[in-house]
């Protein structure tokens, strides 16, 4: 009954979004098959998919996007979990001071991208400080993070934005864990790591899985940070799709929609595989 009441309260907000999403997906898939394409388009039903899947650049961009999404999401969950646990162990009088971690959450992604440029570019603050405080050789040896082929600047920007989000989500769960359980584990001889692994981590697994999926899917399809900090080659799929959509002829519209449809199908498949794998790991952990 509570779920039905909640659904009834949310329906006025959710129904328009659901209809808009369904309409967008139907139009995207239809255009990927050439429905509604301009008269110059001569391809058959699966022509766009055939061209996209045979395009080497699509595979390169897909692998690069997958690397960025996995690295930033995994790093955010890892560092965010460690930071959340350390904040949880702080005395209550320091919790207000520790809430400074929330600042990156309210910053727009574009602001974070320019902040990374300001700090880590060749003439940024970090190389300048290395030059002033250490030596000119230290500044010259500073790695070129901006526009690197591995996308380190994009990953840094996502880490700066996403680690606080992970902390925020996990702290809500950590503060609900009774202190008696932690004390009991320590009295039974469990060290800090074993206490976290056996007592804390099982409580965090659901939120970790949810947060990882959210961060992975967002970074896979995001545009703003890769547009500012990414290279032209390799580029993320979102950037390639944007350029095809706005900078190419209408005859290429089915190619754009085919890429979007494949990204959507990959995202659905990733969620399914991840949840299945996480469920199996959770069952094994419970047996142990």
Image (cartoon, rainbow, N blue to C red):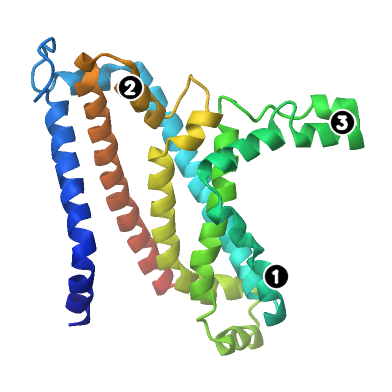
User: What's the CA distance linking mark 3 and mark 2?
Assistant: 42 Å
User: What's the CA distance linking mark 1 and mark 2?
Assistant: 46 Å
User: Residue 253, located in which quarter of the rendered image?
Assistant: top left
Q: x, y percentage for residue 135?
A: 91, 30
Mark 1 and mark 3 lie on one chain; the one further toward the N terminus is: 1
User: Residue 149, located in which quarter of the rendered image?
Assistant: top right
Q: Nearer the viewer, residue 113 or 259?
A: 113
Mark 1 and mark 2 lie on one chain; the one further toward the N terminus is: 1
Name the residue tied to disc 2.
246
> Can you tell which of label 1 and label 3 is closer to the viewer?
1
Look at 52% across and 60% down and name the residue there. 166
Cβ–Cβ below 8 Å for labels 1 and 2?
no
Tell me if residue 52 comes above or below residue 160 in the rendering: above
Q: Nearer the viewer, residue 58 or 280?
A: 58
> Can you tell which of label 1 and label 2 is closer to the viewer?
2
Q: Which mark is residue 97?
A: 1
Element type at mark 2: helix
Look at 82% across and 28% down and name the residue there. 139
Look at 55% across and 30% down and name the residue there. 229
Q: x, y percentage for residue 88?
A: 62, 74
Mark 3 and mark 2 lie on one chain; the one further toward the N terminus is: 3
Q: Nearer the viewer, residue 233 or 241?
A: 241
Q: x, y percentage for residue 157?
A: 57, 42
Name the residue tied to disc 3.
131
Side of 133 relative to 282 (left or right)? right
User: Residue 65, located in which quarter of the rendered image?
Assistant: top left
> Mark 3: few, some, or many residues within 10 Å (few <14, many ≥20)?
some
> Can you tell which of label 3 and label 2 is closer to the viewer?
2
Q: Nearer the viewer, residue 252 or 250?
A: 250
User: What's the CA distance linking mark 1 and mark 3?
Assistant: 32 Å
> Mark 1: few, some, or many residues within 10 Å (few <14, many ≥20)?
few
Q: x, y percentage for residue 82?
A: 61, 62
């Amino acid at each position: 009954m509570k779920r039905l009441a909640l659904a009834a309260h949310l329906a006025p907000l959710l129904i328009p979004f659901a209809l808009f999403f369904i309409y967008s997906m139907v139009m995207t898939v239809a255009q990927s098959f050439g429905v509604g394409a301009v008269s110059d388009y001569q391809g058959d039903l699966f022509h766009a998919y055939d061209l996209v899947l045979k395009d080497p650049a699509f595979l390169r961009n897909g692998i690069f996007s997958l690397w960025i999404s996995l690295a930033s999401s995994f790093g955010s969950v890892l560092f965010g979990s460690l930071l959340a646990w350390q904040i949880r162990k702080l005395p209550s009088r320091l919790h207000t001071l520790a809430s400074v971690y929330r600042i990156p959450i309210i910053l727009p992604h574009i602001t974070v991208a320019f902040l990374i440029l300001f700090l880590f570019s060749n003439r940024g603050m970090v190389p300048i400080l290395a030059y002033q405080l250490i030596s000119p050789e230290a500044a010259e040896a500073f790695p070129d993070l901006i526009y690197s082929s591995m996308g380190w600047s994009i990953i840094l920007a996502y880490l700066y934005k996403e680690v606080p989000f992970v902390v925020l989500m996990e702290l809500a769960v950590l503060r609900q864990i009774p202190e008696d359980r932690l004390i009991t584990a320590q009295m039974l001889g469990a060290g800090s790591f074993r206490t976290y692994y056996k007592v804390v981590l099982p409580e965090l697994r659901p939120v970790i899985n949810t947060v990882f999926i959210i961060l992975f899917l967002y970074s896979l399809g995001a545009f703003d940070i890769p547009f500012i900090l990414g290279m032209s080659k390799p580029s993320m799929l979102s950037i390639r799709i944007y350029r095809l959509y706005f900078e190419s002829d209408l005859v290429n519209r089915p190619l754009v929609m085919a890429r979007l449809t494949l990204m959507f199908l990959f995202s659905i498949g990733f969620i399914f595989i991840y949840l299945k794998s996480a469920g199996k790991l959770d069952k094994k952990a419970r047996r142990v």
